[in-house]
Amino acid sequence: MSAPTLQHGSRLLNQKAADLVVEELSVRYGGVRAVREISFTVAAGEAVGLIGANGAGKTSTLRGLLGLIPRKATRLTLGDADLRRTSASTMVRHGVGYVPEGRHIFPGLAVEKNLLLGAYTQRWRTCGDSLDEIYGLFPVLKTMRSRLAGALSGGQQQMLAIGRALMARPRLLVLDEPSMGLSPLLVDDIVGVLRRLHQEGLSILLVEQNAKLTFATTTRCLVMDQGQIVKTGLAADLRKDPDVRRIYLGM
């Protein structure tokens, strides 16, 4: 897939960027503390990666941030919006786009109807332009716009999930394991799209086990272990860190 571009004055990215500030976020499952008072930021227009092994607390962090599971935080803001008491169902109205682990597209609906569902908070007259831009990013979706989403390949479904989140014109795009189950070639396609979105000014929070993808896509990374952030730094520096190379890159 050739490098994607967005139109000038993109309707997908026309909201002002905003800082995400997370202070002392905690998540519990019963008596188990899955996330232990972690703090981090995603600056406006920044791409931040969150890496760690299975069970490190990455997905729990995301789900807590989004209000999908109970959480506590001293501060949780996106721009001027206080998200601590915001329900998951209204996060999109505050500018958060979410690409969940496992995609969770609607398999019995056509590709285009899946995309339009992502734009339910937007004015109808903007949807046509937004669709055109999604089809520019993912040309294969345009050729399959009338096909049932459940008939798409795993990589195509991942493109659809990202496109659906972008239809809401988010200020922050949050992705959970977008490389899961994809071939290396399709992973490269996803990296290209995320890089372009970042270059165009979209704020991104990426949760991944695939450290190589994360380092290729983000500018700064957080390393989680046992519910805590144990390392943080520029992606280029962490890629050279001996512990990170040994544990996450097998080098």
Image (cartoon, rainbow, N blue to C red):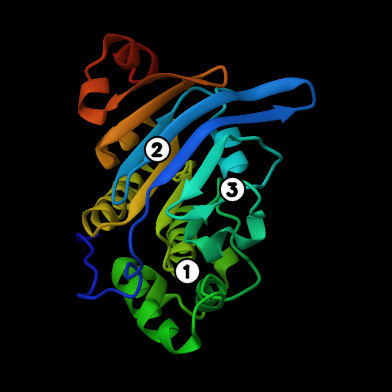
Name the residue tied to disc 3. 66
> Of the residues shown, which amino acid type is indicated by label 2?
Thr
Name the residue tied to disc 2. 41
Q: Do callouts 1 and 3 mark residues in contact (Cβ within 8 Å)?
A: no
The residue nearer to you, when weighing 125 against 188, is: 125
Element class at badge 2: strand
In which quadrant of the rendered view does residue 248 lie? top left
Q: Residue at x 23, y 63 (%)?
A: 4
Q: Residue at x 24, y 76 (%)?
A: 9
Q: Residues within 10 Å of mark 2 (few under 14, many from 20)?
A: some
Query: What is the x, y in percent for residue 189?
Result: 30, 52
Element class at badge 3: loop
Q: Decide if residue 142 is on the left or right side of residue 245.
A: right
Element class at badge 1: loop
> Of the residues shown, which amino acid type is indicated by label 3?
Leu
In which quadrant of the rendered view does residue 170 lie? bottom left
Q: Any mark on residue 168, and which?
A: 1
Residue 123 against residue 25 in the figure, above or below: below
Q: Nearer the observer, disc 1 or disc 2?
A: 2
Q: Residue at x 20, y 27 (%)?
A: 236
Give how far apart the Cα atoms at labels 3 and 2 are. Answer: 15 Å
Query: What is the x, y in percent for residue 117?
Result: 57, 74
User: In terms of sequence position, does the residue under pointer 3 or pointer 2 come before the other?
Assistant: 2
> Of the residues shown, which amino acid type is indicated by label 1?
Ala
Q: Do callouts 3 and 2 mark residues in contact (Cβ within 8 Å)?
A: no
Query: What is the x, y in percent for residue 243?
Result: 33, 10
Give how far apart the Cα atoms at labels 1 and 2 are. Answer: 22 Å
Q: Residues within 10 Å of mark 3 (few under 14, many from 20)?
A: many
